[in-house]
Amino acid sequence: MAGRDINTEEQQWLESTYGKVVNKVGERKEQFSTDSGIGVKPLYTPLDFAEKDYLTDLNYPGQYPFTRGVYPTMYRGRFWTMRQYAGFGTAAESNKRFRYLLEKGQTGLSVAFDLPTQIGYDSDDVMARGEVGKVGVAIDTLADMETLFDQIPLDQVSTSMTINAPAAVLLAMYIVVAEKQGVDQAKLAGTIQNDILKEYIARGTYIFPPVPSLRLITDIFAYCSQNTPRFNTISISGYHIREAGANAVQELAFTLANGIEYVRAALDIGMDVDDFAPRLSFFFNAQMNLLEEVAKFRAARRLWAQIMEERFGAKKAKSKTLRFHTQTAGSALTAQQPQNNVIRVTLQALAAVLGGTQSLHTNSFDEALGLPTEESVKIALRTQQVIAHESGVAETADPLGGSYYIESLTEEICRAVEKYLDKIDQLGGMAQAIQAGYVQREIQDSAYKTQLEIERKEKIVVGVNQFIDEKQTENELLQVDPQLEKDQKRGLAAIKSRRNNQAVQDCLRAIKKTAQEDGNLMPLIIEAVGYYTTLGEICGVLREVFGEYQAINV
Amino acid sequence: MAEQKIKVLIAKPGLDGHDRGARVIARGLREAGMEVVYTGLRQTPEQIVRAAIQEDVDVIGLSILSGAHSYLFPEIMERLKKEGADDITVIAGGIIPEQDVGALKELGVKMIFNPGTSIQEVVDFIKKEIQG
């Protein structure tokens, strides 16, 4: 309308209309801010978007910098992959759970391994006592992997494996199982987590020191770029960084910094950026602050696209797209009034979908109490199905794009992340920043701050520090039978006695020699697992050569 | 009489890598005036008992979220007894299902803290146990 000016009117609104009410009745809090401490204004308007250019900063879905999504059709083409992380006890039991989930409409598999497997110990190792089959499936040899995927055609599912330090061994087993099913490895689809840097700072299942660990990772990149072109060779994970206490900005900053370090490592061995970058994938957390999480996912895409183009000169569009998996936040689940967690998971899952995730795991409401039951896992999956089929949010790409607040927050997160990236560059990159304890300290400070905010009731957690019920609810929980550890050990002993032990020894010697020298370890590990060499034996010779990581005291 | 500082060992038994809770509690107890030693990850029962004796602690706080407590806690309690160190107060936190709590308390674990516990509750409990 002629004669009207938004700058003037906004100032007037703030001072008279809004200001009058605030002066009279006040607001709930002195200051409003997101979980990352970004200040939240009473209102966002076109003025907050004035400096941005639609085509440069947002653009269309499937176009650089991909702020609005990595694919042109997003969920109009197909929904995200509903991928529930599962696996417990023996391979046979996990196989049963996988087939149950596939039958209930899940579209991708996600394997949880037990801790001994994740740290490279066989089930009969003294370090494995009491841990076998507890938080995931125990895998000692190829035989366990054959059982795990029994009657699951590997050319028709995509499989995500949460495995890091010994990722090469588990990937090798997966390739051999496929071969035995008659499936060409070129057809395999899925992801290995293979992200060691976040293990040092957040998740704790490291084995080797950083330098040989990065070598194993780039060996995988090089092998897969030639042989398994549909397999994601890494899932650069902010999830665990967030769970360890980081806020949204830190989660994104440290994840992207880890990504930068992996790209550098691959370039250092002479790979071309466009040969491996399309297979890099990401994994983020979805926490409670719905709008900040949506903005975080959008910021992640924009920043990674810029990093790949500007820092690393990537040419292919696929090298610049940040594709990601999301899991709802385990740390947001409460042991008190656990049914409330169904609602929390719904909000978090909604954030992931509004943020354009490629796949999603929704937690079960009883996970703060113990391992989830079949019933609670089903509710978690149903949550995704309700969002997909009933809520309408999947019908258009990036439905919150253009919201004054979302766009402003996306921009603020980008700027805050860039500050961290500058700081990490100054420290000499992420490996150095971790070695200096900088990253760990940042995360621990945030974790402590969050705890104090909850204790001072500056942050309300329903059922925990307000709206408390005295009555405790009784819950049915899943129990892992202690007999399982014994059975697993017996199975392992049987395989060791009937396999070709000469071939196993030869393979181990070859792995050791190549580890000491140069050359890609992947083909040797694939050969070794084919002879039923155990995970612990392979990691054992690598431990001899590479040594073990000693955590620094922060 | 100058009051002796309460000394606490915060330990992570087994292979579990979740140490957010352990670290937050360690810091909270320190800020409440206690002397705290944190073991770091992947401690065997042997290592934990040895550290507790060497450091001459009043309290051991075990943190575990992996489900291996039903094997590891009895091991630790037995070794403490064998070494004559069962005067040390043992408390625990993490993800420990309600149905396991009774058995662990029978072994001598004084208190199991659930997710959602405040630092203050832990501080108060330790002070009451040690200083009466």
Image (cartoon, coloured by chain):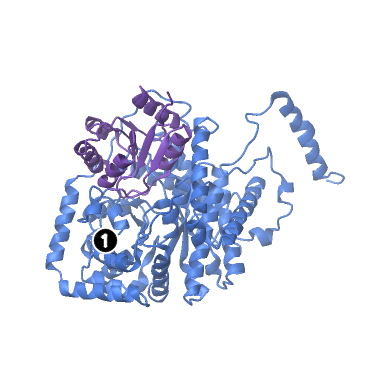
Chain colours: A blue, B purple
Q: In the displayed image of the protein, which residue is found farthest to the front?
A: B1
**Left/right of residue B95 with respect to residue A234 in the rendered view:** left
**Left/right of residue A395 with respect to residue A330 in the rendered view:** right
**Left/right of residue B85 with respect to residue A447 in the rendered view:** left
**Left/right of residue A522 with respect to residue A345 in the rendered view:** left
Q: Position of residue A485 (x, y in %)?
A: 19, 50
Residue A531: quadrant of the picture: bottom left
Q: Which residue is mark 1?
A: A149
Closer-to-camera residue (A459/A378): A459
Residue type for callout 1: Phe
Considering only vertical position in the picture, is A377 above or below A305?
above
Provide the secondary structure element on which disc 1 rests.
loop
Residue at image position (42%, 26%) is B3
Query: The N terminus of chain B is located in which quarter?
Result: top left
Query: Dot 1 surroundings within 10 Å: few (below 14), some, or many (20 or more)?
Result: many
Residue at image position (30%, 53%) is A115
Closer-to-camera residue (A244/A99): A244
Q: Position of residue A545 (x, y in %)?
A: 32, 69
Q: In the displayed image of the protein, which residue is found farthest to the right?
A: A3
Let me know if residue A4 appears in the view: yes
